[in-house]
Amino acid sequence: MRPSPALGPNAYFIGVAGSRHSLDTPALLLDRAALERNIAKMAAIAEQHGIGLRPHVKTHKSARIAQMQIEAGAVGVSCATLGEAEAMVQAGIPGVLVTSPVVSTNKLRRLVALAEKAGPRQLMVVVDDACNVAELAVLAARLAYPLDVLIDYQCGYHRTGVPDEDAALALARTIAETGSLRLRGIQAYGGNLQHIAARNQREDAAAQLRETVAKLVRALRSAGMPIEMVTGVGTGTHESDAGGGVFTEMQPGSYVFMDVEYAQVLSDETRGAPFETALYVQSTVVSTRAPAWVTVDAGTKSFATDSVAPVVARGVDGPAQYAFFGDEHGKLTVDAEHRPPLAARIEFTTPHCDPTVNLYDRYHVVDGDTLIDIWPIDARGRL
Ligand code: PLP
Ligand code: MN
């Protein structure tokens, strides 16, 4: 039987022993066993500390992986965009939190329609502005139940969020007056803390943020506001925040795949990274004519370019250094004894996993040397 065109040119290889090394590239590879172990490990950390887990789907944008996270015990999922939330609700994923404010009339209409589709208490959104709250409240009045909102609190990054306790309290009062919206709690995501390189500094910064957030929660509660949920926490601070007693849930994303950046941040001299690399970009050597390097078919359209360089994980026996070499090409500098031949497959750990995933239509799921499945990246490009 002819495989579905939606699965792409590698569909014929599903289940063929050794097929990992014959794929059309560039291809995004997902090591299923490593993915499963990462999902189970974060779920166990959350369970051990009695804290909820609402993993961020901005990393994988996949309903299938979201479902695996739910089956492992997650209370729901977090989404960065309305488009991601629509893809998750469409797939029947419960407990969807939109972690960025949704602004403009058309998007607010989409949000309310989505809340209706999801059902009572299955969709939440963060807010940081009274006019936005007022507009959302009018549109949400047509729902048969109140729409759940969280106040987004600015944690030092100044990207979104109310700046202080007074502003949080004022916004909480505005929400309470609407009738069509229900305040569930606050979001305090310290995005600027997640990649602090030194572990003790990162943990100190996380502890400091928890103190500020605890104070905010006390202030809101003593003013009679129902703060039942306190969400935040990424992969970088999960160890410190899980047992910190302030957050009621965590929303890490990158732990499912890991990447070059997070492997550096989370490893220290005494131990390796707590999660395994599960995501790779596989490329092919397409030219060996240059004497000092080989050219591979993965360039700026195959890797996110906002951070570090991709790192070779498989395919070269000695040291190798990747450099971007245009949209479709990479320059892989290797010494004379280790030069891979033309058509060799080279696999890279991704520099920054989330924006890399968004460049691809599908995951090539591998078990050892064999391609075992192809999963769509459902919310790819859904901004
Ligand atoms: N929560 C929010 C609001 C985010 O923006 C992000 C990532 O940028 C995350 C959670 C997940 O963080 P990480 O991928 O570092 O685990
Ligand atoms: Mn990221």
Image: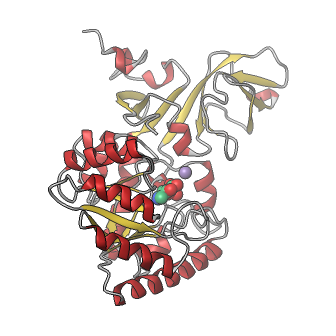
Task: State the image coordinates of residue 382 (x, y, percent, origin top left).
Answer: 43, 36
Q: Where is residue 210 in the image (x, y as percent from the top left)?
A: 49, 80
Which one is in front, 51 or 15? 51
Rendered image quadrant of residue 363 = top left
**335, above or below 1, in the image:** below
Please indicate, yes or no, whether residue 41 appears anywhere in the rendered image.
Answer: no
Quadrant location of the N terminus in the rendered image: top left
Q: Which residue lies furthest to the left in this view?
A: 144
Q: Which is more toward the observer, 324 or 12?
A: 324
At x 65%, y 75%, the residue is: 201
Q: Which residue lies furthest to the top in this view?
A: 2
Do we see residue 81 in this rendering? yes
> Which of the pair 259/303 is nearer the observer?
303
Measured from the top left, where is residue 173 in percent x and y?
Answer: 36, 76
Is 348 drawn above or below residue 329 in the view shown? below
Identity of the residue furthest to the bottom in this view = 222
293 with respect to 149 (left or right): right
Expressed as whole percent of the image width and height from the top left, the position of residue 58 reads: 45, 47
**Please, which colouring scheme is shown?**
secondary structure
* Residue visible at 62% across and 44% down in the picture: 351
Residue 220 as seen in the image, left or right of residue 202: left
Relative to residue 8, is residue 28 depicted above or below? below
Q: In the displayed structure, would residue 312 be above or below residue 346?
A: below
Please tell me in which quadrant of the rendered image residue 184 appears.
bottom left
Residue 156 located left or right of residue 249: right
User: What is the number of callouts on the image?
Assistant: 0
